[in-house]
Image (tube, rainbow, N blue to C red):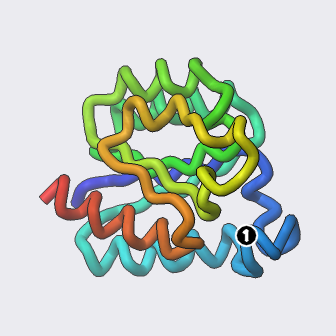
Amino acid sequence: MPTVFILNGPNLNLLGQRQPEIYGSVTLADIERDCDALGRELGLQTRFFQSNHEGVIVDTIHEARQQAQGIIINPAAFSHTSVAVLDALNTFDGPVIEVHISNIHKREAFRHHSYVSLRAEGVIAGLGVEGYQLALRRMASLLG
């Protein structure tokens, strides 16, 4: 069964509490539960991670090189700032899908550019937490 790492960047641990007008009331634990269930249905094993620290995200991408066939990543603010996350993703051989809960193109101008998008096979933005489910479905077809 292929393994997919689902990585989440800074402040996503506060989903359901932080800016619900933008991010809604669903928690990261809810997303993890739903991704795990859908992953099993699609024949994928999911491993969920969240960190507020750039180096931990980089280290987890390095782990994925040995343990995963695909990465789904919501890099959050690291999307717009982290060449280190991009460089780490460039060392990963499998598909990468970038997810954003909000539409980053309708927000502040600095959010319109994502370094991670340079590596991603696809980008899902603005579809709420359903973006994770869509990313898993696409990942299943890429790995199938």
Q: Position of residue 55 (x, y in %)?
A: 67, 25
- When the figure is inspected, residue 106 is found, relative to residue 114, above or below; the finding is below
Q: Residue at x 71, y 40 (%)?
A: 109
- Position of the N terminus, as image quadrant, is bottom left
The residue closer to the viewer here, 88 or 23, is: 23
Q: Residue at x 87, y 71 (%)?
A: 17
Task: Residue at the far left: name it.
Answer: 144
- When the figure is inspected, residue 90 is found, relative to residue 57, above or below; the finding is above
- When the figure is inspected, residue 103 is found, relative to residue 71, above or below; the finding is below
Q: Is residue 58 left or right of residue 135?
A: right
Q: Is residue 16 left or right of residue 83?
A: right
- Where is residue 93, by image quadrant? top left
Task: Classify mark 1: residues with Cα within 10 Å, few (<14), some (14-19) or many (20+).
Answer: many
Q: Position of residue 111 (x, y in %)?
A: 67, 41
The residue closer to the viewer here, 124 or 71, is: 124
Q: Is residue 121 left or right of residue 117?
A: left
Q: Residue at x 41, y 37 (%)?
A: 64
- Where is residue 56, by image quadrant? top right
- Position of the C terminus, as image quadrant, is bottom left
Q: Is residue 16 left or right of residue 68?
A: right
Q: Residue at x 35, y 71 (%)?
A: 39
Q: Position of residue 81 (x, y in %)?
A: 67, 27
Q: Which residue in the structure is indicated by mark 1?
A: 23
- Where is residue 23, by image quadrant? bottom right
The residue closer to the viewer here, 101 or 26, is: 101
| Amino acid type shown at disc 1 | Tyr
Count all numbered tags in the image, as a single digit: 1
Q: Position of residue 47 (x, y in %)?
A: 47, 56
Query: Element under label 1?
Result: helix
